[in-house]
C-alpha cells in the first residue's frame, strides 16, 4: 500500500482536548505520524499506509467534538536537493589573539 496523508479539522477547546485528539489519531493502525497544521493549529495531518479515514473521523467526533474531513491524498515525495560543493575555509589560529584591537595585546611583567 502507498502512503497517504489525511487532514482532519477538529474544534478543540483547551489543551486537554488537543492532547486527547492527537492521542486518538496516533492510536489508529497504520499511522506513522500525526501533527497539527493550519494557521490556528486546529487541523491534524495524519500520514501512514492503510489508514481508514472514516474510522479516524468517527472516533474524533465521538471523543473530542465536531470533526470535519478536509482532504485525503497521497504523500508528496520530496525532491532530493542538490547540495553545493563544500568549501573548506582554513582559519589562521593566531588571528584570534588580537581580540579585535588594532594592536596585539601584550602583558607587562614587573620584577622587584
Image: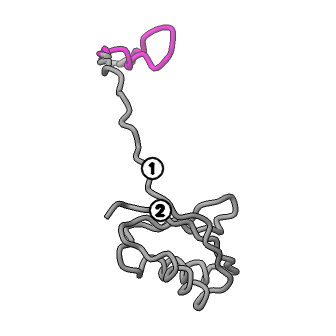
Q: Are marks 2 and 1 in contact (CB under 8 Å)?
A: yes
Seen from the viewer's position, the closer of residues 95 and 38 is 38
Q: Position of residue 42 (x, y in %)?
A: 65, 69
Residue at x-position 47% and y-position 62%: 5
In magenta stretch: residue 102: yes
Identify which residue is drawn at 40% across, 47% down.
77
In this view of the protein, which residue sits in the foreground, 1 or 16? 1
- Note whether 80 is above or below 87 in the view shown: below
- Look at mark 2 in the image and give the residue it sits on: 5
Residue 81 rendering spot, x and y as whole percentages: 38, 32
Classify mark 1: helix, strand or loop.
loop
Residue 21: quarter of image: bottom right
Taking the spot 58% from the left edge, 64% from the top edge, the residue there is 71
Label 2, label 1: how many angstroms apart (C-alpha)?
9 Å
Membership of 103 in magenta stretch: yes
| Disc 2: CA contacts within 10 A as few (<14), some (14-19) or many (>=20) | many
Residue bearing mark 1: 76
Amino acid at each position: 500500500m502507498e502512503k497517504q496523508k489525511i487532514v482532519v479539522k477538529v474544534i478543540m477547546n483547551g489543551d486537554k482536548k488537543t492532547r486527547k485528539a492527537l492521542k486518538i489519531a496516533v492510536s489508529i493502525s497504520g499511522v506513522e505520524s500525526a501533527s497539527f497544521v493550519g494557521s490556528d493549529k486546529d487541523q491534524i495531518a495524519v500520514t501512514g499506509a492503510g489508514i481508514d479515514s472514516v474510522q479516524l473521523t468517527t472516533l474524533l467526533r465521538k471523543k473530542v467534538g465536531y470533526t470535519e474531513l478536509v482532504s485525503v491524498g497521497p504523500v508528496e515525495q520530496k525532491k532530493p536537493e542538490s547540495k553545493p560543493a563544500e568549501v573548506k575555509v582554513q582559519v589562521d589560529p593566531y588571528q584570534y589573539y588580537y581580540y579585535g584591537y588594532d594592536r596585539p595585546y601584550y602583558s607587562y611583567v614587573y620584577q622587584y
